Amino acid sequence: MKIAGLAGGVGGSKLALGLYRVMDPAGLTLIVNTGDDIVMHGLHVSPDPDIIIYTLAGVVNEEHGWGIRNETFHLAEGLKRYGRPTWFNLGDRDLATHVHRSALLKEGATLSQAIDAIRKALGVSAHILPMSDQPVPTVLDTDEGTLHLQDYLVRRRCEPSLRGISFEGVESVRPAPGVLEAIADADGIVICPSNPLISIGPILAVRGVREALRNRREDVVAICPLVGGKSLKGPSDKMMSELGYEVSAAGVASLYRDFCGTMMIDDADEASTSAIKALDMRPVVRPTVMRSLEDKERLAREVLALFAQRAR
């Protein structure tokens, strides 16, 4: 079975790991958000692809969901002495990834090629694709002015009130090589339980991606990132509320209705099934909270079972 998944960072990595462990990983292609890429200390940092790769490689800091386990921060301490900003805290081994990626890019590699080199070096056999090889920074309009997404998430800890989201230059960028092909050729497509506005939204905004998903609508399954109207991690609920979206499983479904045929929601949101059906989507109720490795594998099997049912 060939599976394509759209994913952000921490939330997406949980289901990605489950899929990676319960299916042939060579059949898994993950299309990952790069809207929150940022240049720090002259280095190109790709937070979401790195989280996915570190997770599948078994080296991620599981307590945080990002960074590398048992990390040290000697370089960051040195940078702080020089007066450089360290609000975006990068560990020493994590920095090695950013140095390597930045060097590859300077030598003429594309972002796809750099990410592929990193995942191979860390022994990851699934395919990891950025949404585009070209930069598409996610920029937020807030009551404190215009902020890069990382400024909002990390430096300002999601405190500013949100007025709007834009993806700079997205009109002129192309999907990375293999993105549209992965969607077209997959036996099933998964929208991982990532923030629909700032993790999945940027991928959908890249030219051709949403249309490719529409062409496969009945083969697309989304897992709702909200449980009981709340985010399990991150500011999805706060952002949706401030931008006027209904903060519920049905609210997330409404964002995906044009390209997604099946919406998997948690038991806590069973009351939303009627509203989801009204969107011409099939609601599937399962326990979706992934606290343990067993939870991640169980949910991955549930998703794969849905695709297997359609294939019969």
Image (tube, grey):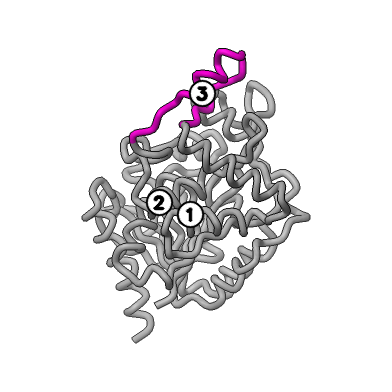
Q: Mark 3 and mark 1: span between their CA atoms?
A: 28 Å
Kindly identify which residue carries mark 3: 76
What is the quadrant of the N terminus in the image? bottom left
- Dot 2 falls on a residue whose secondary structure is helix
Q: For the point 55% across and 71% down, which residue is it?
A: 182
Kindly identify which residue carries mark 1: 7
Q: Is residue 281 above or below residue 287?
A: below
Q: Is residue 51 above or below residue 79?
A: below
**Mark 1 touches mark 2? (CB < 8 Å):** yes
Quadrant of res 66: top left
Q: Residue furthest right?
A: 172
- Comes first in the chain, label 3 or label 2: 2
What is the quadrant of the C terminus in the image? bottom left
The magenta segment is 70-91
Q: Mark 1 and mark 2: span between their CA atoms?
A: 7 Å
- Magenta part, dominant SS: loop
Expressed as whole percent of the image width and height from the top left, the position of residue 114 reads 60, 54
Amino acid type of disc 2? Ser
Q: For the point 40% across and 51% down, which residue is it?
A: 13
Q: Nearer the viewer, mark 3 or mark 2?
A: 3
Is 86 in front, or is 227?
86
Expressed as whole percent of the image width and height from the top left, the position of residue 10 reads 41, 44
Tag of residue 13: 2
Q: Nearer the viewer, mark 3 or mark 1?
A: 3
Lateral position of residue 53 relative to residue 155, left or right: left
Amino acid type of disc 1? Ala
